[in-house]
Image (cartoon, helix red, strand yellow):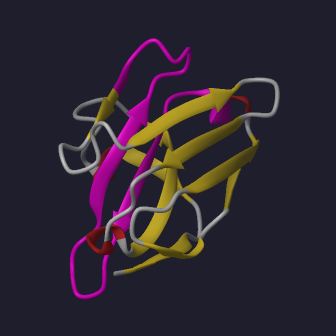
Amino acid sequence: QVRLEESGGGLVQAGGSLRLSCAASGRTFSDGPMAWFRQAPGKEREFVTFISRNGDSINYADSVEGRFTVSKDHAKVTVYLQMNNLKAEDTAVYYCAAGFRGGYNTQERNYGYWGQGTQVSVSS
């Protein structure tokens, strides 16, 4: 069983920054590709970013490109999401995903494991 635990969420003013963390534990493939998704109130969960196992392949949603940066610490089996220049529309619960099964990495159905989520609220 893989366990994912997010942290780092909170309330921040527009233009501010937050750094989210997702620590993975359990089966060895928890050190595989990982992703972040988010779900705003009343909306479906949407893709934010993906990072391959070795970090040599990364992609972002257009809405966060240039403002968010994903990184990975292999030793800690932790993935980070640095979020800068936050906007009100970034307000959402942010989820970490692992257990990528192949296919489009932007689709949540292609991930087998999810964290509980961490709330990010941006005031305008």
Q: Could you tell me residue 63's position as x and y percent?
A: 20, 51
Identify the residue at horizontal 34%, vertical 72% (top origin): 39
Can residue 41 be seen at all in this image of the molecule?
A: yes
Identify the residue at horizontal 34%, vertical 81% (top origin): 124
Instruction: Give 110 or 95, whichever is nearer the viewer.
Output: 95
Q: Is residue 79 magenta?
A: no
- In this rendering, the answer to whether 77 lies above or below 97 is above
Instruction: Give 93 or 2, whichever is nearer the viewer.
Output: 93
Q: Could you tell me residue 21's position as x and y percent?
A: 66, 51
Instruction: Please indicate whether residue 77 sits to the left or right of residue 112 in the image.
Output: right
Q: Which region shows up in magenta?
A: 29-58
Where, by quadrant of the figure, is residue 45 drawn?
A: bottom left
Instruction: Give 70 or 75, whichever is nearer the viewer.
Output: 70
Instruction: Please indicate whether residue 4 sits to the left or right of residue 92 in the image.
Output: right
Q: Is residue 53 magenta?
A: yes
Q: How many marks?
A: 0
Identify the residue at horizontal 32%, vertical 66% (top origin): 87
Instruction: Please indicate whether residue 5 sits to the left or right of residue 118 in the image.
Output: right
Q: Could you tell me residue 9's position as x and y percent?
A: 60, 69
Q: Could you tell me residue 10's position as x and y percent?
A: 60, 75
